[in-house]
Image (cartoon, helix red, strand yellow):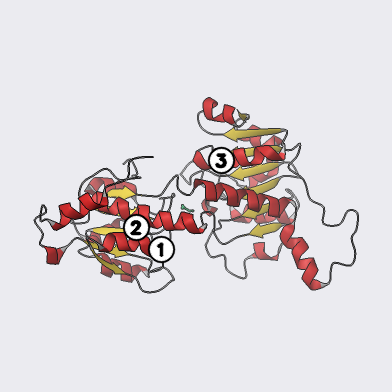
Amino acid sequence: MPPRLPIARVRNFLQLGLRTRTMSSQPSVYVTRPDVDASGLELLRKSCQVSTWSETLPVPRAELIRQIAGKDALYCALTDKIDKEVLDAAGSQLKCVSTISVGYEHIDVEECKKRGIRVGYTPDVLTDATAELTVALLLATNRRLFEANKQVFNGGWKSWAPMWMCGQGLKGSRVGLLGFGRIGQEIAARILPFKPAEITYTTRSPRPQEAAAVNARHVDFEEMLRNSDFIVACCALTPQTKEIFNAAAFQKMKSNCIFINTARGGVVDQHALYDALKNNTIQAAGLDVTTPEPLPLDDPLLKLDNVVILPHIGSADIETRKEMSRITARNILAGLVGEKMEAEVIL
Ligand SMILES: O=CC(=O)O
């Protein structure tokens, strides 16, 4: 982990007038979520003028465009699309954008690069929480926890029955991971104690050292689709992975396959997933991410029993979210004074 930025140093730098600004015109930061953990906002308030959107729902785009004008830094979330229009509205003084997320596909990083705007994000800190949630979702899906829980309330639970609510165990199964970065590796490490027959991973280039630590084997996408009992999407959303799980991919999966997605809704063609679940082309799916988010209440996926859907809570562990708030703030403080950010997107 990169060394923490000495906050006192940044504060002194800003406050002792090493900048051309005066105290009354401290750098200005716009924060798009008022409900991020206060510890991050407090860090910013020590040396910056902080204004925040006031509601818990995402800031409307027109308001973001209005508020960002003249700001030195932006503290945003994955619900905010930071594109050319927003950057134009900000003005040339904008020095950095820092998102409270590991994913940054909502930020036009090419536009940022052109303008010399630095981009901070929050990898690493959320790896364990996201891996934990992935395993929780996998277990909830393969052991049919939500379906079973419903039976307790709706009278479906008449008696213990030998084959009722049975699911497919991880033991002896083949688990395929699309993506083998920090999160993928931690998912593999957590699955290993469930004694799968094999863990495979699909990435552009093999990562033998990391794979050896979890007994994972590199396979191509085709092999992963055809041989896995569980497929977990834990990759970034890129032009290469966009809707990689399409009708053709679901057709290749085994009929007992359980598909888990804690990456991004965009890696899946959701209509194709619906068809695959409805027609039992695959057995079940567990999704922490969908397109769109939130999923409309009349979405056909919500009518199926063989899908578990969570509202994008991968990193929603209290300590994790608190630290994400602080890292987002520290990234901004570093960006404002031209120091190395704690976690910076390489542009
Ligand atoms: O999905 C969550 C994140 O990118 O942090």
Q: Is residue 335 above or below residue 201?
A: below
Question: Going by the image, does 290 lie left or right of 50?
Answer: right
Q: Which residue is mark 1?
A: 37
CB of mark 1 near ligand 1 (< 8 Å): no
CB of mark 3 near ligand 1 (< 8 Å): no
Q: Amino acid at mark 2?
A: Ile
Q: Secondary structure at mark 1?
A: loop
How far is disc 2 from disc 3 in space, using C-alphas? 30 Å
Q: Residues within 10 Å of mark 1 (few under 14, many from 20)?
A: some
Q: Which mark is residue 186?
A: 3
Question: Going by the image, does 276 lie left or right of 102?
Answer: right
Q: Which residue is mark 2?
A: 82
Asked if the residue at tag 1 contacts the one at tag 2, i.e. Cβ–Cβ closer than 8 Å, the answer is no
Image quarter of the N terminus? top left
Image quarter of the C terminus? top left
The residue sitting at 30% across, 59% down in the picture is 43
**Residue 267 percent coordinates (x, y):** 54, 48
The residue sitting at 58% across, 56% down in the picture is 288
